[in-house]
Amino acid sequence: MEKINPDLVIERIKEVKGWFVDGNAIKKTFKTKGWPSTVGLVSTIGTICQQFDHHPDYLLMKYAEIEVSFSTHTAGGITQKDIDIAIEINKYA
């Protein structure tokens, strides 16, 4: 999968609520209602990642907040796969 042109990434990510470009990655912080919701969303994100065979650069879990970052290491930046997984995660958040 090839890296997307930076201008196109900015345009596409605008359509994915809450996600933003940070260097060579896309990121989002999810707010939850507390620990049980946080753990549940982390589990959901993990399941989606397995289905996509695409895993985050990192996932930071706090009591009522999750920060997640995606890029495609083999492409050296952001690909359509990163955008697609962001869209899918948003369906459950």
Image: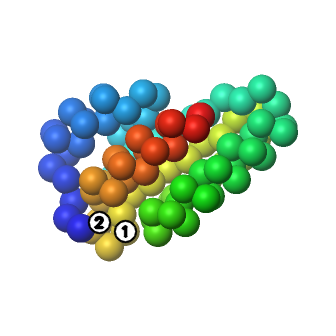
Determine which quarter of the picture holds residue 36: top right
At label 2, which amino acid type do we have?
Answer: Gly
In the image, is residue 83 above or below residue 64? below
Can residue 55 be seen in the rendering of this structure? Answer: no
Marks 1 and 2, how far apart at CA: 5 Å
Q: Nearer the viewer, residue 36 or 73?
A: 36
At label 1, which amino acid type do we have?
Answer: His
User: Relative to residue 61, is residue 6 drawn left or right?
Assistant: left
Give the residue at the far bottom of this rendering.
74
Q: Where is residue 18 in the image (x, y as percent from the top left)?
A: 46, 28
Q: Residue at x 24, y 42 (%)?
A: 9
Q: Which residue is drawn at 45% across and 63% down?
A: 52
In the image, is residue 74 above or below residue 60? below
Q: In which quarter of the image is the N terminus?
A: bottom left
User: Relative to residue 93, is residue 42 drawn left or right?
Assistant: right
The residue indicated by pointer 1 is 73
Can residue 64 be seen in the rendering of this structure? Answer: yes
The residue indicated by pointer 2 is 76
Q: Which residue is drawn at 60% across and 42% down?
A: 67
User: Relative to residue 16, is residue 39 drawn left or right?
Assistant: right
Q: Residue at x 64, y 50 (%)?
A: 44
For the residue labelled by badge 2, is the local secondary structure a helix, a strand or a loop?
A: loop
Binning the other alpha carbons within 10 Å of mark 2 as few (below 14), some (14 to 19) or many (20 upward) gives few
Q: Position of residue 16 (x, y in %)?
A: 37, 32
Q: Do the residues labelled 1 and 2 touch (CB within 8 Å)?
A: yes
For the residue labelled by badge 1, is the local secondary structure a helix, a strand or a loop?
A: loop
Q: Where is residue 24 in the image (x, y as percent from the top left)?
A: 33, 52
Q: Quadrant of the C terminus?
A: top right
> Residue 20 got which mark?
none
Q: Position of residue 50 (x, y in %)?
A: 55, 66
Binning the other alpha carbons within 10 Å of mark 1 as few (below 14), some (14 to 19) or many (20 upward) gives few
User: Relative to residue 9, is residue 64 drawn left or right?
Assistant: right
